[in-house]
């Protein structure tokens, strides 16, 4: 088996907790539609990994007009929202730097629209650590279809055997299986309580994932004489 060279990350629920931002935007949309409803994190999290249409339609519910236009409105508001550094899960900012320093190449594979993926990573000042960022677009099938992962691997110039995909949901697990990429499951994200990613590494903290990957790479670094 080829040693892992590339760590590919899901974004929402894996690197960032975007649910609080979604709460603010969707409650603003509800108020503007004359609704007395106020949604919180519990309502948001059940939709957070399912993509924009499911999130917007599920949360706005009876207040939702034309779903396509509502999603456009939501994404336009999101594009103007400065991603707070507090959105990063504990250990991510430092962990990403450590993985880069250990010689891993990092990438993003997310169902979030391409421009929003790039914006969020830029807001968090992590762009230099992710040479390949792939999000959704109208001409790309969303996860768990293999399209986005194939674009990531093409951008990295690599093969499934040299990659590890890190995600937090059933969709991520299904994508890894569909593309033959090894999977690591972070348990702190948006997966349903019923989901269990059997036969793969599981981590309850990002720092534990980083330590595992650093230790896994040490024999290769030693063989190359890297201090």
Image (cartoon, grey):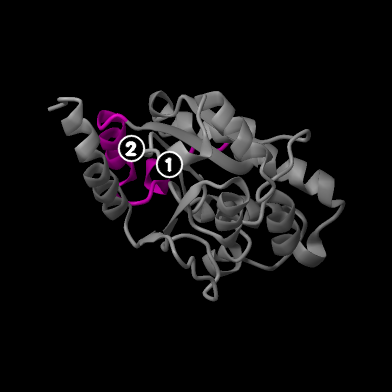
Mark toward the start of the polypeptide (1 vs 2): 1
Residue 30 seen in the current view = no
Residue 25 against residue 76 in the figure, above or below: below
Query: Image point 73% across, 36% down: which residue?
Result: 140
Give how far apart the Cα atoms at labels 1 and 2 are: 17 Å
Query: Image point 33% across, 37% down: which residue?
Result: 96
Residue 206 seen in the current view = yes
Regarding mark 2 in the picture, which secondary structure is present there?
A: helix
Q: Position of residue 193 (x, y in %)?
A: 52, 74
- The image quadrant that residue 133 belongs to is top right
- The image quadrant that residue 148 belongs to is top right
* Crowdedness near tag 1: few (<14), some (14–19) or many (≥20) residues, C-alpha within 10 Å: few
Residue 132 — which label? none
Query: Image point 33% across, 52% down: which residue?
Result: 206
Q: Which residue extends farthest right?
A: 66
Q: Nearer the viewer, residue 45 or 174?
A: 174
* Crowdedness near tag 2: few (<14), some (14–19) or many (≥20) residues, C-alpha within 10 Å: many
Residue denoted by label 2? 96
Residue denoted by label 1? 84
Q: Which residue extends farthest left?
A: 227
Magenta part of the chain: 81-103
Q: Position of residue 27 (x, y in %)?
A: 63, 57
Regarding mark 1 in the picture, which secondary structure is present there?
A: loop
Q: Total label count? A: 2
* Image quarter hosting the N terminus: top left
Residue 112 against residue 196 in the figure, above or below: above
**Horizontal side, residue 100 vs residue 32: left or right:** left
Q: Nearer the viewer, residue 115 or 210?
A: 210
Query: Image point 43% across, 41% down: which residue?
Result: 84
């Amino acid at each position: 088996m080829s040693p892992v060279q590339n760590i590919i990350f899901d974004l929402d629920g894996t690197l960032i907790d975007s649910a609080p931002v979604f709460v603010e935007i969707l409650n603003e949309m509800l108020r503007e539609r004359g609704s007395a409803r106020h949604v919180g994190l519990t309502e948001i999290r059940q939709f957070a990994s399912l993509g924009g249409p499911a999130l917007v339609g599920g949360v706005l519910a009876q207040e939702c007009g034309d779903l396509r236009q509502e999603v456009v409105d939501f994404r336009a508001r999101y594009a103007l929202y400065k991603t707070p550094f507090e959105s990063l899960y504990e250990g991510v900012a430092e962990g990403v730097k450590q993985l880069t320093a250990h010689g891993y190449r990092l990438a993003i594979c997310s169902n979030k629209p391409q421009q929003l993926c790039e914006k969020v990573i830029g807001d968090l000042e992590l762009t230099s650590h992710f040479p390949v960022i792939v999000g959704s677009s109208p001409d790309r099938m969303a996860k768990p279809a293999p399209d986005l992962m194939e674009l990531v691997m093409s951008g990295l110039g690599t093969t499934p055997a040299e990659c590890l995909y890190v995600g937090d949901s059933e969709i991520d697990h299904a994508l890894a299986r569909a593309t033959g990429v090894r999977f690591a499951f972070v348990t702190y994200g948006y997966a349903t309580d019923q989901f269990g990613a059997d036969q793969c590494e599981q981590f309850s903290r990002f720092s534990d994932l980083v330590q595992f990957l650093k230790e896994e790479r040490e024999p290769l670094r030693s063989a190359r004489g890297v201090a």
